[in-house]
Amino acid sequence: MTAAAAVDDRPAPQAPALAEAPQPTGEMPSAGDRLKQVAIAALDKLAGAAVVKVEELADKLGDMAADAVSGNMPTGVGANALMKGVLAKMEGKNPVIAALKGAFGAMSTGTKIWLSLALILLAVLSPVALLVLALVLLVAAIVGAVKG
């Protein structure tokens, strides 16, 4: 792929124009007509925002593809998780499990240890936190019954 082929000559994404209000005829529009105009305007605005976001995402994916062609693959935990998830999806496997495995595999040893310790701590302290929450709710119920 040459540098000239990688240049994007598409126009910048534009939001679609808002629906035009009907011309005044001298009488007041009904509430249904006004609600319809508001709904059309809101949908036009949302559609415009969606078009812009899709175009941005397409540009990012195009940049990633151009980088991959030139040999500059993204690195890091997120990029590895993304690549493993996409590969698993193409193979018909569960992409979430593959992405988690890819993310964990890309972590350094120290990060793996800290994450493992945090998960163990979470597993040990979760029942304690639930017990404290139950006691707080019990006290709140007793206080509410006494006041009421």
Image (cartoon, rainbow, N blue to C red):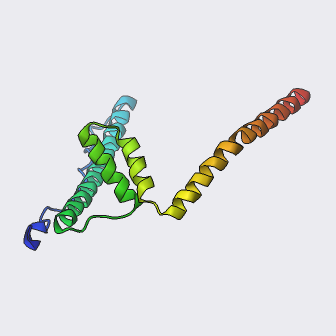
Residue 23 shows up from this direction = no
Picture quadrant of residue 78: bottom left
Q: x%, y% of residue 19?
A: 26, 44
Residue 138: % across, % down: 82, 31
Residue at 25 percent of width and 40 percent of height: 91
Quarter of the image that includes the C terminus: top right
State the image quarter where residue 124 is shown. Answer: top right
Q: Can you see residue 15? A: yes
Out of 104 and 76, give the one closest to the viewer. Answer: 104
Query: For the image shown, how many numbered marks are present on the structure?
Result: 0
State left or right for residue 139 relative to residue 116: right
At horizontal 54% and vertical 64% (from top left) the residue drawn is 110
Please say if 104 is above or below 109: above
* Position of residue 9 in the picture relative to residue 113 (left or right): left
Residue 134: where, in percent of width, then height? 77, 33
Instruction: Reply above or below: 64 against 93.
Output: below
Left/right of residue 137 with respect to residue 120 in the rendered view: right
Residue 78 vs residue 11: left or right? right
Outermost residue to the front: 109
Above or below for 12 versus 19 = below
For this orientation, the residue located farthest to the bottom is 3
Q: Quadrant of residue 127?
A: top right
* In-front residue for pair 58/133: 133
* Residue 107 % position (x, y): 45, 60
User: Which residue is at a point 34% across and 42% down the rendered structure image?
Assistant: 95
Q: Nearer the viewer, residue 130 or 139?
A: 130
